[in-house]
Image (cartoon, helix red, strand yellow):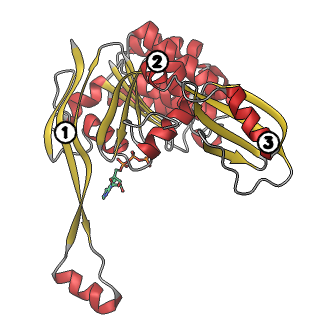
Amino acid sequence: MSIIEVNHLYKQYQIAKRQEGLGGALRSLFHREYTTKMAVQDISFAVKQGEVVGYVGPNGAGKSTTIKMLTGILVPTSGDIRVNGVIPFKERQKNARQIGVVFGQRTQLWWDLPTIESFELLKQVFQISDQRYRQNMTTFSDILGLGEFLHTPVRQLSLGQRMRADIAASLLHDPVILFLDEPTIGLDVVAKERMRTIIKEINRERGVTVILTTHDMSDIEKLCKRMILIDNGRVIYDGELSKIKERFGKDRVLIVDLEGENSGFVIAGTEVIKQEGNRKWLRFNRDEVTASQLIHQISQKYEIKDLTIKDPEIDVIIRHIYEKGIGSQAGA
Ligand SMILES: Nc1ncnc2c1ncn2[C@@H]1O[C@H](COP(=O)(O)OP(=O)(O)OP(=O)(O)O)[C@@H](O)[C@H]1O
């Protein structure tokens, strides 16, 4: 049974054209011209209860627009959405009771109040029973380590503490679905890892379905079996993360550190996918060329200081897909 169903979803924004100068501004008071932006075009997917799904795409792909429609903030232009049987924009309150939402970029907590008071306010808003509130606070204090900052005003929390408080706030009313929008943004390596462990635990212990939007591919790798990749408002891939790795599995990346001048660096059969100073990342297809052939080629023209061969990392694969499309085999 799917807990989220999205069918042929579209969202079009109307954007008012600005006319130049004072005359233009006056004219547009009486006659506004609009352009349209199709932010989401024919998106369909279904999510099963208990899944953790990565919703991924480049800037402006339509991720937030989709999430806003799933949470009921935006009304679709057309198409159908069911979140646990509810049409979000028609029954916003009912939907709000069954979902939790966390935005990495802003907090839902009251900035000037001690953290605990935000939780108490949410208890009132969602009419959470005393007993359930106490149980949840005990669990969250364990998992999220809330104890150390419960009485500190939100504005004084570190980003990692604030994110943990936001996650607790989003789960107080026992939602069955959690939308996480960039939950690790700005966190240091240790705090990121802690956040990922927490998300895993919440999913495992409480069976909460998680939709995760992130630009950090390590989040996806560590948390999601499935990834929905969108670009230009359309789904370009929906499936297991491991499959995408297999599909691009013929690729290897040769990282070379060169000595001296190397402008105009080109090596047949490879594509330079990244460079930092004299270090270059070259992608090649191991069915077409061997690493030793490449090394031989490079060493005839340049002096090699150091080299490593790697499978491409998932962020490199995804960046390649953004740039070249899903149809292309990396390195082709
Ligand atoms: N309120 C709005 N009015 C007009 N256009 C909008 C509005 N919100 C978003 N857009 C446009 O719709 C497209 C999709 O935006 P959206 O915010 O959904 O992308 P995103 O994938 O979340 O991007 P990011 O990773 O940068 O957050 C973009 O071209 C954006 O400029």
Q: Which numbered marker is on residue 9?
A: 1
Residue type (three-letter) at the residue carrying disc 3: Gln
The x and y percentages for residue 299 are: 80, 39
Q: CA distance from mark 2 to mark 3?
A: 37 Å
Q: Residues within 10 Å of mark 2 (few under 14, many from 20)?
A: some
In the shown orientation, is residue 318 left or right of residue 156? Answer: left
Mark 2 or 1, nearer chain start: 1
The x and y percentages for residue 205 are: 45, 7
In the shown orientation, is residue 282 left or right of residue 231? Answer: right
Residue type (three-letter) at the residue carrying disc 1: Leu
Q: Give the SS element for disc 1.
A: strand
In the shown orientation, is residue 26 left or right of residue 295? Answer: left
Which is closer to the viewer, label 2 or label 1?
A: 2
Q: Is residue 320 above or below residue 199?
A: below
Q: Give the SS element for disc 3.
A: helix
Residue at point 29%, 85% (across, down) = 25
Q: Which numbered marker is on residue 242?
A: 2
The x and y percentages for residue 307 are: 78, 32
